[in-house]
Image (spheres, rainbow, N blue to C red):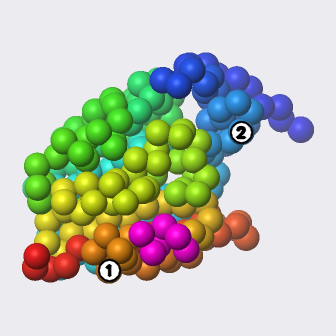
Amino acid sequence: MIPWETIERAAAPDGAELVLARHGDEWAVRAAGRVLMTSRLHGSEEALAALALERLARPPRAVLIGGLGMGFTLRAALDRLPATCAVTVVELVAALAEWNRGTLGDLAGRPLEDRRVRLEVGDVAARIAAARPHAFDAILLDVDNGPAALAHAANDRLYGAAGIAAAAAALRPGGVLAVWSAAPDDRYLARLRRGGLEASAVPVPAGRGSGACHVVFVGRSPARR
């Protein structure tokens, strides 16, 4: 059996150690021994982009993606977006951005090299809060295990009423907020609806050949407001 090989180590802003490891052709990023992401299962990350963009009534001009991961959500979005669309990617961990530019780049076809993409290293909650009204056609979030399974306590700013209100304000009329989650969360779905979004929870396969299922929450802003 091929053992896992540690390739890189880095510290996250909260002090947790991130480990980039390889097992044959499979890559994984772990924090405190827990797998945060793997190159073997990324179907739900791709579904995050597909479900958000297919619900837009018009071609998008600007999209915000919170969480770079291994680049699979970004790649799925780029494959569906027009050449004129600007894509802002906000990633909290600088090392993960560096790994995507180097070691992990080929996994998703080096999406950071696309001319439409602008990468920002920082907090996506702060980026959304600072956005001008109606700045984005779509906001895609994959920065944690979901609203009820926070890897970083500060991410509650994204999932609480204030975070939903900030995202809704940053969306254009008819825009879409899509949020990846490891599991269903009825309370979060209710908060999205109370925040004025037409919201649903869509089960999606974790990846090809896997029996696991994740959830994408999709909230659409009213066409006119």
Q: Which residue is mark 1?
A: 198
Asked whether the viewer can see residue 199, the reply is yes
The secondary structure that dominates the magenta segment is helix
Callout 1 secondary element: strand
- Which image quarter holds the N terminus? top right
Give the numbered dot on residue 34.
Answer: 2
The total number of labels drawn is 2
**Residue type pointed to by label 2:** Arg
Question: Residue 66: horizontal and vertical position, in percent?
Answer: 36, 47
Asked whether the viewer can see residue 80, the reply is no
User: What residue sits 54% from the left and 56% below the top?
Assistant: 146
Question: First in sequence: mark 2 or mark 1?
Answer: 2
What stretch of residues is rendered in magenta?
A: 186-191
Q: Is residue 38 left or right of residue 142?
A: right
User: What residue sits 43% from the left and 56% below the top?
Assistant: 159
Q: Nearer the viewer, residue 182 or 98?
A: 182
User: What residue sits 37% from the left and 76% below the top?
Assistant: 193
Query: Is 150 drawn above or below residue 213 in the view shown?
Result: above
